[in-house]
Image: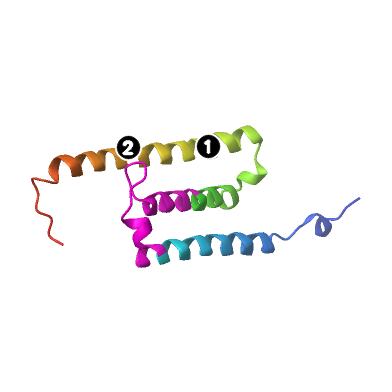
Amino acid sequence: MTTHAQEHTSHTWLIWKVFIILSVVTIVEVALGIWKPEMLHLTTIFGTSPLNIIFLVLTLVKAYYITWFFMHMADETKSLRRSVVWTGVFLVIYLSTLLLIEGSYLNDVLGPLVKWNY
């Protein structure tokens, strides 16, 4: 028969691993936001700059790790994990797509009419 002390497993290494991954992703996001390389910022792919796409992907990676580990989805059933994670991923991608399409449309329509003060 196992004792309670033997059943307890420490997840300290896992917490530190997730912390390091989330920190690295955040540092990359902040560095790209400050640096803004011209090849990523001034070119256009799918109606937006590659820098925006990189930010969206990195944000989805962070949302996945936060949901998976801090909401304890790794310990849930497969169907619950998929329903929570994939629904969130789909909604974020859908919202991002709509915002980029509408933002591009507004810029094209209102761009000639508005003087932007920078």
Query: Residue 54, image x and y in percent?
Result: 43, 52
Q: What's drawn in magenta, residue-wise?
A: 32-60
Q: Is residue 75 left or right of residue 70?
A: right
Circle 2 sits on which residue? 98
Query: For the point 58% across and 48% down, which residue is it?
Result: 68
Q: Is residue 80 left or right of residue 58?
A: right
Q: Is residue 6 left or right of residue 81?
A: right
- As displayed, is residue 47 above or below residue 2? above
Query: For the point 36% across and 39% down, which residue is it?
Result: 97
Residue at far right of view = 1
Which of these two is toward me, 109 or 6?
Answer: 109
CA gap, disc 1 and disc 2 = 18 Å
Query: Count the marks: how many?
Result: 2
Which element type, helix, strand or loop, lies under badge 2? helix
Query: Residue 13, image x and y in percent?
Result: 68, 63
Query: For the point 60% across and 35% down, which residue is it?
Result: 80
Query: Residue 43, image x and y in percent?
Result: 33, 52
Say what amino acid the circle numbered 2 marks: Leu
Query: For the point 22% across and 38% down, which residue is it?
Result: 105
Which element type, helix, strand or loop, lies under badge 1? helix
Circle 1 sits on which residue? 86
**Residue 67 falls inside the magenta stretch:** no
Which of these two is toward me, 17 or 48?
Answer: 48
In the picture, which quadrant includes the C terminus? bottom left
Q: Of label 1 and label 2, which has the lower sequence position?
A: 1
**Residue 52 falls inside the magenta stretch:** yes
- Dot 1 crowding, Cα within 10 Å, few <14, some 14–19, many 20+: few
